[in-house]
Image: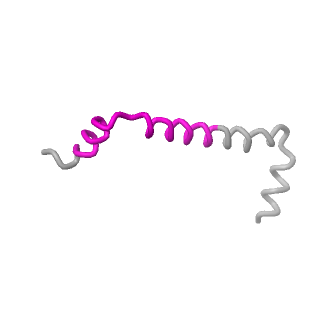
Amino acid sequence: MLKFVKNHMETIAGIEIYPIISLTIFFTFFVVLFWWVFTAKKEYISRVSNLPLDN
């Protein structure tokens, strides 16, 4: 089955750009998330983490 999918994908023109685009989106998302985690204020993190416990 993998051989069929691989051969079918090779016949599509311009298909080689999609893995590059998906890697770029993945990498950008996690870099932004990493940056947000380290720059977030401690008060905000504490307030949001206590939300499920508040009634």
Please state which of residues 36 and 52 is positioned toward the viewer in this rendering: 36
Left or right, residue 6 beside residue 44? right
Q: Main secondary structure of the magenta part?
A: helix
Return the x and y of residue 47 as percentages of the image width and height: 24, 39
Q: Residue furthest bottom?
A: 1
Residue 17, located in which quarter of the rendered image?
Answer: top right
Left or right, residue 30 beside residue 1? left
Please state which of residues 5 and 28 is positioned toward the viewer in this rendering: 28
Name the residue rendered at 85%, 49% in the picture: 10
Give the answer, above or below, for where 8 lies relative to 15. below
Return the x and y of residue 44 as percentages of the image width and height: 30, 35
Q: Is residue 36 magenta?
A: yes
Give the answer, above or below, for where 5 lies relative to 20. below
Report the magenta residues as a range. Answer: 25-51
Task: State the count of labels.
Answer: 0
Return the x and y of residue 38 as percentages of the image width and height: 44, 39
Name the residue rendered at 76%, 65% in the picture: 1
Left or right, residue 35 beside residue 52? right
Q: Residue furthest left?
A: 55
Residue 42, located in which quarter of the rendered image?
Answer: top left
Q: How is the image coloured?
A: one colour
Left or right, residue 10 beside residue 51? right
Quarter of the figure that contains the C terminus: top left
Residue 7, located in which quarter of the rendered image?
Answer: bottom right
Q: Is residue 28 magenta?
A: yes
Name the residue rendered at 62%, 38% in the picture: 25
Return the x and y of residue 29 as percentages of the image width and height: 56, 38
Name the residue rendered at 73%, 44% in the picture: 19
